[in-house]
Image (cartoon, rainbow, N blue to C red):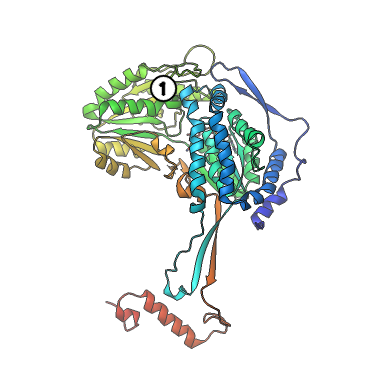
Amino acid sequence: MEPTAATERKRDRSPAPGDGASPGVETFEVHDPTDGSVIETVDVASPGRVAEVVARVRGAQPEWEAMGFRQRYRWLGRLRDWMFDNADHLADVMQAETGKVRADAELEAPFICDAINYWGERAERFLADETPPSHNPMFKVKRLRITYSPYPVVGVISPWNFPLILAYDDAMPALMAGAAVVIKPSEVTPLVAIEIARAWKEEVGGPDILDVVNGAAETGGALIDEADFIQFTGSEKTGKSVMRRAADTLTPVSLELGGKDPMIVLSDANLERAVNAAAFGGLANTGQICMSIERVYVEEPIYDEFVAQLADRVGELRQGRDDDSFKQDLGAMTFPPQVEIVSDHVEDARQKGARILTGGKRKDGAGDWYEPTVIADADHSMRVMVDETFGPVIGVMKVKDADEAVRMANDSSYGLSASVMSRDTQRAEQIARRLEVGAANIDDVLTNYFLQDLPMGGWKSSGVGFRHGEYGIKRFCRTEAIVSPRFPQGKRDPLWFPYKRRPRRAIAAVFRFLNARGLRNRLGLGKRR
Ligand code: NAD
């Protein structure tokens, strides 16, 4: 594909390969959150190094795009097979750097294998040329076509909570679209992303269109400067910095940001299911999911029973360092400063009169641990009900009825997703429609993320754009509208120079006939009353 002005601009800014690496390379340490020990030291990619990597994959991208969908799927299919064969190894790497339990760690590689198949089998159809008919009969003589071409280099900046899924879930549609991808994983948990990029090169022998650059804000900023499209997943605060930085080069961004997801429990809900759903939705991955259930609104008649059962259920959960025997339900917190935030939210709620029914404190000993916690009688004066906690804490509030529940659920700057628990699916769906969120799960939690078929993205401060579904791949493409003649062309069209009164008036009359409403009006025979 010919370079565009925009890619030329980005190219001009990139040094030739080899120019970038600084002699004294900086490094950072990756820790095991279960005990704080150092597990690996990783080189920081300087801005020069980032430019070099982007220039390199940019050089290989045209061939990747030209090989077509089937061939690209063949390559990614080999990566899928490698991931299935090495799922245990990948889970080990992830457990070490995140402190996750096995069940949470093992989820990630198969999810990406499914994503590879989803995009591999649909990308060609999703990105096929479209030929919409003209809405205007005057243009029926034209053939209209929309084409989709990938941004040459997509930069993916990802967070620490799902280091494999959130690095590669967006990379896969970008790669299937024909883009090259450079991932900047979280500096807290870069190892699994590095390992997959290594496998792509060394085990799969894939083309040089996928790489990882490591570091923190400076490295991420450099990737924004160099890439042609940025997919960012992370906090609201960083998302705003990313958007500001991208404005300098007019680089398009898609932002998947934080959440404060509510669950509404209606009085006709299957109580036991609602309790189990709240415990799982709130505490899976130690509550470190953007879509974690962080606040629960329960209708008055079942409130006391709900909080009592939830406290029991959460009190039974096992927390500790896991191996591959699935002996724990909750692991450590991955990012040490997050323990401080969780602790602040719980103390704030305690001081303002909420009841801490179970948990409510850090665990003693080495590492970053916080007990699974249920807070009853919470309200919106408390940070735990309004700010993102991103830890193993569930706040529960009593509401008079469904209307109050909807009002409270919408009283948030975030709008990622929500759950409505009820036996009456139709009523729950009506309630879901009133929620200001990008996704709603009826009588369920978290499930929408696993459905690649559906758009996943947030309203309000939860993001800009969507991943998954047809749009999830189209966002990595530029569209081109091509207008062609259907029939042999004359020397000139009636609209062209020289302007003449009669043909212009004739065109105006036809235009009016087609677009005015009512026969008299179409014929210009007087105003309608
Ligand atoms: P973060 O915003 O601190 O960091 C995310 C990434 O951005 C990291 O790779 C980081 O190094 C990089 N970064 C930091 N400063 C940057 C800058 N100035 N320019 C470019 N890159 C920069 O987020 P985190 O703490 O890693 O992740 C937790 C947050 O992510 C939570 O708010 C959570 O809700 C959100 N999240 C959202 C989704 C979603 O799909 N909506 C999914 C998972 C996590």
Front-lying residue, 357 or 6: 6
Front-lying residue, 99 or 210: 210
Local crowd size for mark 1, using a 10 Å CA cut-off: few (<14), some (14–19), many (≥20):
many
- Pinpoint residue 503: horizontal percent, then vertical percent: 48, 85
Question: Eyeballing the image, is 518 above or below 11?
Answer: below
- Pinpoint residue 57: horizontal percent, then vertical percent: 67, 44
Front-lying residue, 145 or 99: 145
Query: Which residue is at 38% across, 26% downward?
Result: 280
Quarter of the image where one finds residue 317: top left
- Residue extending farthest to the top is 365
Q: Quadrant of ligand 1?
A: top right
Query: Which residue is at 48% across, 75% downward?
Result: 141
Amino acid carrying mark 1 in the image: Val
Mark 1: is the Cβ under 8 angstroms from ligand 1? no
Front-lying residue, 50 or 62: 62
Question: Eyeballing the image, is 56 above or below 45?
Answer: below
Question: Eyeballing the image, is 146 above or below 208?
Answer: below
Query: Which residue is at 34% across, 82% downward?
Result: 523
Label 1 SS: helix
Q: Quadrant of the N terminus?
A: bottom right
Left or right of 175 on screen, residue 2: right
Q: Is residue 397 in view from this perspective?
A: yes
- Pinpoint residue 360: horizontal percent, then vertical percent: 40, 18
Q: Is residue 163 in view from this perspective?
A: no
- Pinpoint residue 337: horizontal percent, then vertical percent: 53, 24
Q: Quadrant of the C terminus?
A: bottom left
Q: How many marks?
A: 1
Quarter of the image where one finds residue 493: bottom right
Query: Which residue is at 42% across, 26% downward?
Result: 284
Residue labelled with disc 1:
346
